[in-house]
Image (cartoon, grey):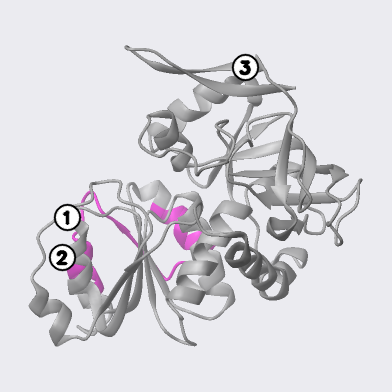
């Protein structure tokens, strides 16, 4: 099969289309003929050598795919060859064929293309497991999402709206802010010309928001704590601006705040399977009824994965970037 491989040298780390051995599913896995794969920031980090795949995972990039089941393991009971599915995988997605755990597969929603379906797993698993499970968002509680124009951000806006939660976002341009509002955000703040802390205080009459979903890290931490209401929860899912900052613990103690974080890739299949069940039960009806749809910015052919990564690095996209196989 053909797959995108990362070629590392002393001066660069390039991607190229190469011929590789076709993977074989174990007893709990299925083999999928990949039609489309999502591009995510962890792919860029793995390529840079700072986010290695878990033990036993493919070293081929790609964490989410959509396609057709062509072979099943001996203990697989819910899927069969010919089924159209999307799946969360620990690696191997940038390829013609990829194996996935049965527990991490979901049916392609009604009237969805492969490209649309490939945009679902990574962002929907991430938002649901953090905001709805770890963050335990309750009816009417407010959510602030940093990076509203990202795949995570556009998913969080739509899910919060679907479940009746007010959602505020930050984004890096007026155009992205307008698009976030069109998706359902109550307020979109351009972080390049507006202080989001002051704006959140004004919008909430000084109360703050109940939950913050943050992928920025670094100096955002103390600013985030200023934005949280009493008993608020900060959910850290990435650290694009660094892993360290100084924190005054009084702000944490006085408002009884919770800071938590998670990564998805290294979680076990039992946890991922539970999230998949929750999504199919509680979120897939919104997808099947066209109430929620992934936002697709650009689709690149698989051979142009290098260009797809370069485009993501510019931070100009809104929504998901997809590779079509």
Is 195 colored magenta in this rendering? yes
Foreground residue among 57 and 87: 57
Query: Would residue 10 appear left or right of 83 to someone viewing this image?
Result: left
* Element marked by disc 1: loop
**Which contiguous range is marked in magenta?**
177-200
- The location of residue 3, given as percent across then percent down, is 65, 24
Q: Taking 312 as reference, is 248 above or below it?
A: below
Query: What residue does disc 3 label?
Result: 17
**Which residue does the image show at 17% across and 69% down from the upper left?**
198
**Which residue does the image show at 34% across and 46% down from the upper left?**
173
Location of the N terminus by quadrant is top right
Query: What residue does disc 1 label?
Result: 219
Count of marks, rendered view: 3
Query: Between marks 1 and 2, how big is the CA–CA gap?
Result: 7 Å
How crowded is the residue under tag 3: few (<14 C-alpha within 10 Å), some, or many (20+)?
some
- The location of residue 83, given as percent across then percent down, is 88, 50
Foreground residue among 240 and 29: 29
Query: Between marks 3 and 2, how big is the CA–CA gap?
Result: 43 Å
Is 100 colored magenta in this rendering? no
How crowded is the residue under tag 1: few (<14 C-alpha within 10 Å), some, or many (20+)?
some
Q: Which numbered disc, 3 or 1, marks the residue that appears first in the sequence?
A: 3
Foreground residue among 144 and 199: 144
Query: What residue does disc 2 label?
Result: 222
């Amino acid at each position: 099969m053909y797959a995108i491989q990362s070629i590392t040298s002393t001066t660069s780390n390039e991607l190229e289309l190469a011929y590789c051995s076709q993977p074989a599913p174990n007893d709990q896995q299925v083999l999928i003929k990949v039609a489309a794969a999502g591009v995510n920031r962890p792919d860029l980090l793995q390529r840079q050598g700072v986010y290695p795949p878990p033990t036993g995972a493919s070293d081929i990039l790609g964490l989410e795919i959509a396609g057709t089941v062509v072979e099943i393991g001996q203990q697989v009971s819910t899927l069969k060859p010919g089924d159209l599915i999307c799946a969360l995988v620990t690696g191997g997605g940038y390829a013609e064929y990829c194996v996935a755990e049965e527990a991490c597969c979901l049916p392609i929603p009604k009237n969805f293309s492969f490209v649309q379906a490939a945009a679902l797993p990574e962002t929907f698993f991430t938002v649901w497991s953090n905001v709805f499970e770890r963050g335990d968002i309750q009816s009417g509680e407010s959510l602030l999402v940093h990076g509203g124009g990202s795949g995570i951000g556009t998913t969080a806006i739509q899910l919060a709206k679907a479940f009746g939660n007010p959602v505020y976002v930050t984004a890096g341009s007026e155009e992205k802010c307008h698009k976030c509002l069109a998706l359902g955000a109550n307020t979109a703040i351009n972080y390049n010309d507006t202080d989001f802390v002051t704006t959140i205080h004004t919008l909430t009459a000084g109360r703050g928001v109940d939950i913050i979903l943050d992928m920025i890290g670094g100096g955002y931490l103390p600013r985030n704590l200023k934005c949280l209401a009493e008993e608020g929860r900060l959910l850290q899912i990435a650290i694009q601006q660094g892993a360290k900052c100084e924190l005054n613990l009084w702000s944490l103690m006085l408002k009884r705040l919770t800071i938590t974080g998670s990564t998805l890739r290294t979680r076990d299949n039992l946890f991922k399977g539970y999230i998949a069940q929750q999504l199919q039960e509680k979120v897939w009806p919104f997808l099947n009824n066209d109430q929620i749809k992934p936002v697709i910015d650009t689709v690149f052919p698989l051979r142009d994965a290098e260009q797809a990564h370069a485009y993501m690095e510019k931070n100009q996209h809104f929504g998901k970037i997809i590779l079509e196989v």
